[in-house]
Image: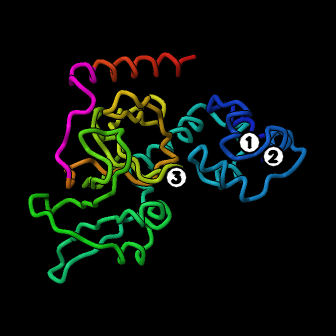
């Protein structure tokens, strides 16, 4: 058994090309090819990136001989993403509570927006956030408030705040649900979600403004998901896109085009 051979078998099992993997890992294709062909030994840091990419453990790569894997063993390895999507690998949510032990709703200020993807799991970061109370929301759920920028999600306007309810099990999210996502690359994102987890382990993100094209995000790139519950704005909502039926029709066409492109 060699690590290089395991990397090659993993890639082929998940239907990826060397270009796919090397780009995702931030490597040159020739460098990654060298790892697969045992020209060079990948560092532990590279192996850790590979484990994140396939959503499997580092030990699985280092201690198994994939060339001897049975169909059931491959199936078990391939299904490991479910534990992440269903919340068994997600962190325990850090939260603030009042003196009476009631959970408070943290508000992410605009200035802290960029740093949230790095500090979301840091108790000290969360503790410094301002808090609000919204008594009409369920006390049995955890909520948080996020700043929104841009015009991709009318009637929610630029500068508004959206309040979300924390989701532990991402597989339970129904398609066409507005959600706040915290991703590794984009940070805080507010979109309509089409749940494609069972199909290809992704979520399709759609704007209510049809001028913005839908795009998919892989589960491994998502840190948190919050279901939209309400929004706070100092501006009255305005109809800036036009007829709702027209907007819905355009979004339906965009979905169809996205599916066609993804099959090529």
Residue 209 seen by the camera: yes
**Residues drawn in magenta:** 235-248
Estimate the spatial distance between the alpha carbons at disc 3 and disc 2, rounded to whole Å: 31 Å
Q: Which residue is mark 2?
A: 2
**Left or right of 108, for residue 222:** right
Q: Quadrant of the C terminus?
A: top right
- Residue at 75% of width from left, 36% of height from top? 8
Residue 23: x and y in percent read 69, 40
Residue 146: x and y in percent read 32, 57
Query: For the residue carrying disc 2, how many other residues have a C-alpha within 10 Å: few (<14), some (14-19), or many (20+)?
Result: some
- Residue at 16% of width from left, 46% of height from top? 236
Query: For the residue carrying disc 1, how many other residues have a C-alpha within 10 Å: few (<14), some (14-19), or many (20+)?
Result: many
**Left or right of 47, for residue 203:** left
Q: Which residue is mark 1?
A: 6
Task: Please identify, in this view, whether the residue under mark 1 or under mark 3 is nearer the observer.
Answer: 3
Pick the front one: 135 or 167: 135
Q: Is residue 93 magenta?
A: no
Residue 96, placed above or below residue 40: below
Q: Which residue is mark 3?
A: 184
Location of residue 171 by image quarter: top left
Residue 164 seen by the camera: no
Estimate the spatial distance between the alpha carbons at disc 1 and disc 3, rounded to whole Å: 27 Å
Marks 1 and 2: CB-CB under 8 Å?
yes
């Amino acid at each position: 058994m060699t690590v290089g051979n395991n990397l090659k078998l993993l890639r082929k099992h998940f239907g990826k090309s060397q270009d796919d993997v090397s780009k995702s890992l931030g490597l040159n294709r020739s460098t990654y090819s060298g790892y697969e062909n045992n020209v060079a030994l990948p560092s532990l840091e590279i192996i850790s990136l590979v484990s994140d990419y396939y959503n499997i453990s580092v030990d699985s790569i280092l201690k198994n001989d994939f060339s001897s894997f049975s169909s059931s063993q491959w199936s078990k390895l391939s299904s490991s993403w479910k534990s992440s999507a269903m919340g068994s690998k997600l962190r325990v949510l850090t939260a603030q509570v009042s003196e009476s032990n009631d959970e408070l709703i943290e508000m992410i200020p605009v200035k802290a927006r960029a740093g949230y993807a790095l500090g979301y799991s840091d108790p000290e970061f969360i503790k410094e956030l301002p808090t609000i109370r919204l008594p009409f929301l369920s006390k049995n759920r955890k909520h948080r408030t996020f700043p929104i920028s841009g015009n991709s999600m009318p009637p929610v306007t630029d500068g508004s705040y959206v309040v979300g309810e924390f989701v532990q099990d991402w597989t339970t999210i129904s398609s066409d649900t507005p959600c706040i996502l915290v991703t590794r690359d984009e940070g805080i994102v507010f979109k309509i979600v089409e749940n494609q987890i069972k199909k290809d382990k992704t979520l399709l993100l759609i704007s209510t403004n049809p001028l913005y094209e839908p795009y998919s995000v892989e589960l491994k790139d998502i840190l948190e998901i919050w279901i939209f519950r309400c929004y706070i704005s100092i501006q009255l909502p305005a109809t800036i896109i036009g007829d709702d039926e027209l907007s819905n029709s355009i979004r339906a066409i965009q979905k169809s085009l996205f599916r066609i492109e993804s099959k090529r």
